[in-house]
Structure formats: structure tokens, C-alpha cells
Image (cartoon, coloured by chain):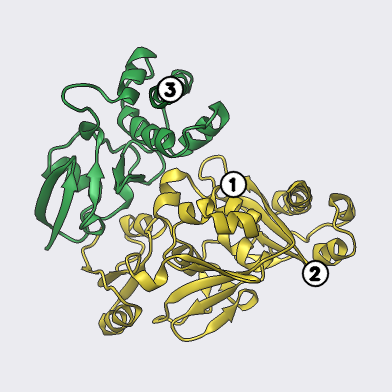
Chain colours: A green, B yellow
Amino acid sequence: MIRVTLKVNKRPVSIEVEPRTLLVELLRDKLQLTGTHVGCDTSHCGACVVHVDGRSVKSCTMLAVEADGATVTTIEGLAQGGKLHPMQDAFHQHHALQCGFCTPGMIMSAVELVETRPTADEHETREWLEGNFCRCTGYHNIVKAILSCRDAMKEKSA
Amino acid sequence: MRDFQFHRPSTVADALRILRQASQGKLLGGGQSFLPVLKLDMAEPSDLISVSGIPELRGIRSDGQQVTIGAATSHAEVARSAEVRAKIAGLARLADGIGDPQVRNRGTIGGSLAHADPAADYPAAILGLSATVKTDRRSIAADSFFTGLFETALEPDEIITSVSFTVPQRSAYAKFASHASRYAVVGVMVAQYAGGVRVGITGAGPSAFRWKQAEDALSIRFSADAITAGMTYPSDDLTSTPEASAEYRAHLIPVMTRRAVQAALAG
């Protein structure tokens, strides 16, 4: 067992894990943060996307021990003070989900996109979602929601 | 996944010491190829040694005609590097098309090259851009780095420390990506130098290779139509899978080479 010390959704965590424990297993099984989903478990589908030090990663393809010292944000950490993150709000407004299974990963990927590429157009947004599968094929409203959130954030900073 | 001992050394010297002491040691970069291998129990290392946090393996330096990328530099860092974009645009674009954004945030150039997946993108880059792979003990020319399917010239206890690319006049990478995996069915890096043109091809065969016939033609005239209809690559040694036959890959080689030349000329 190895002790890992990290921050998850601004909360300090220090816990012993087997070296083979995946980050998503630490989040879901040890910390009960079950908003992060496991879809394919082969790093294709993106249901497990979380942020590690501000960048989106597939938590099924990272060891928990690799996150030692890192700052992790999951879907549960986006809302602040009972208020949804603008991306969550945009997904709600545009009904950007059908079954909802891919939604946590979609939102975490989308948040990195608007934070790091605020000028991304529709084409770039669709390319960015390369690693997030919506098995319901509901991409149309997902892209609409992301672009609307991008515009709202632009207005806010203008 | 079988359990293992995990190590996170902070120097190359420590990583080498741990690797040599382990009964079945394995180096871990960003893990985007190797963790899936571990999950399938296709590898059962006794010790996993993460090198991604070693400071001497990180960063991008540019020095005249060379751009040197630390082995633990992520694909995303290469893609957004102002230095790489200014000096070797084709390399920045290649890095920006590897896998998906999450793979690019974790995966590293050293890890990708050491893994030597026949359909990875970087192999075409190191061949096309006349790169040198630097290790803890020597420099290996790109032309002698890949030795076969998932095989390289690296010794079992050797660590890639950086990769030095030679700055071309122009370069571009054109990839025909697998719809499912985004790996290259065929990927072509074309780079024009004062002394001639280099063409590095990945995805098509058991390991990346150069297409000399195209290099000769493009060195005389750097234009897509220099790759004439009569110029073909023999399919004999190419990869055949249910997704793409050897003949199909052979057909894609000149097609993607022309597209890479067009992209290089467009800048």
C-alpha cells in the first residue's frame, strides 16, 4: 500500500491505496464521488474525465498514485455555493443530455475547452469532443450548450 | 491488473538504479498506451517506475537548427509550444492530432517512442524531421531507432531523455486516422530541407519507415504532383487488418504524401 495525498474538490485527502488502484477507483470507491462514470474502461469513451491540475484526463487511465500531490476536480466540484457552474447550467438550458451517462465527462472536457481555447468555434468544439462518446448520439445539443456557455463567459469577461 | 511496486524517482540516475534492481522493472511515461496494456494483463511488471515527474526530462528548448523536447513532455505541451509552432509547424500539428485532448494531456513523446506502436504518430515525425533520440548514455539516429513491431534499439535499462528535431524549411503531417481509435491507418510526415526532402511514414507497416522514391522526386520538385500516379509503394510488407488491407494502405501512402506536401506548401 502507498499513501497518496492530494486535493479533491478543494478538500485535502490522504489515503492508502494499492499501487494498481486507478484514479477513478479512488474517486468512486474510496471517496464515494460516483458522479465520475466508468464507461469503457479502455480510455476511449471519456465518461471518466476529471481535471488533474486544471487539465482534463481520463481517470480510468491514470493511477491514483500518479495523482499524489495533485489537485483534482470532479463533476461534484464544479458547482459553487449551491450555484451550478455555467457549463452545467448551459447543459441544463439546452437539454444537452439524453441518458446522461456521458454528461459528467462531457462537461469536464467542455470546461477545459472554454477555459483554454475561449475562441473555439463549432468545428473546433466538435474536434475537442473526440474523446467523449455520447452513445445516444446527442452531440447536437451538447455542442450548442458548449458554444452558448463560451458566449456567456465571453460576455461576462467583456 | 496485477499489483506492482510503484516508484516516482526525481532523477534519471535514481530511475536507472531502481530499474536495474527490479526483477521485472518497467518505465512509465504518461501511461496512455501502457496502462491499457496492464489492464489486459499483457504485461506484469514487478516494479513500475514513473518518470513523468523528473525535472531533467521536461521542457522544450530551441537552439538554432535544433528543437529539443524533453522525453516527459506531453503531446499537449508540444502542440501549444510557441517555439515548436514557429519552427516546426508540422510537428505542432501532429502533436495536436494524437488521440484526443485527454490523451494529449497525459501522453509523452518519450513514452510514445519507447512503446513504438506501429500506428503512433511520432514515429513518422522523428523519421521525417531527421531527429535524434537522446538517452541516458547515447544518441540514436531516428533511422536506426525502430527495429520492428513494438521494438526499438533501446536497451532494457535505457531511458530516453530527449528528442532533438532538425528544423526544416517546411513540414506537414497528413494522417488518415482510424475512425475508432484515431491511430494512423497511414500517417505521412513530409519535411523539406536545403539538402533534400524526407518522408516518414507510420501506420502502414510493422514499424515506421522512409519512402525514398518520394523523397527523391520531391527533392527535385517540391509539389504534390511530383508524386505521380505511377509512383506506388509495394504492399508486400505492409500491415493487413480487417479495418485496412495492405493494398489499401499502399494506396493511401501516395495519397497522404500528396496531402502532406500540399499542407506544407500552404504553410
Left or right side of A2 for A54: right
- Asked if one can make out residue B239 in the rendered structure from this viewpoint, the answer is no
Dot in front, 1 or 2:
2
Residue located beneath label 2 in the image: B194
Can you give x and y, in whole percent of width and height, for residue B186 in the image? 65, 52
Q: What secondary structure is marked by label 2? A: loop
Alpha carbons under labels 2 and 3: distance apart: 48 Å
Residue located beneath label 1 in the image: B242
Q: Residue at x 46, y 19 (%)?
A: A144
Q: Quadrant of residue A31?
A: top left
Residue located beneath label 3 in the image: A142
Q: Amino acid at mark 1?
A: Pro
Can you give x and y, in whole percent of width and height, for residue B264 in the image? 74, 52
Can you give x and y, in whole percent of width and height, for residue A90 in the image? 36, 19
Chain of the residue where label 3 is placed in the rendered structure: A
Left or right side of B123 for A30: left
Q: Residue at x 35, y 13 (%)?
A: A93
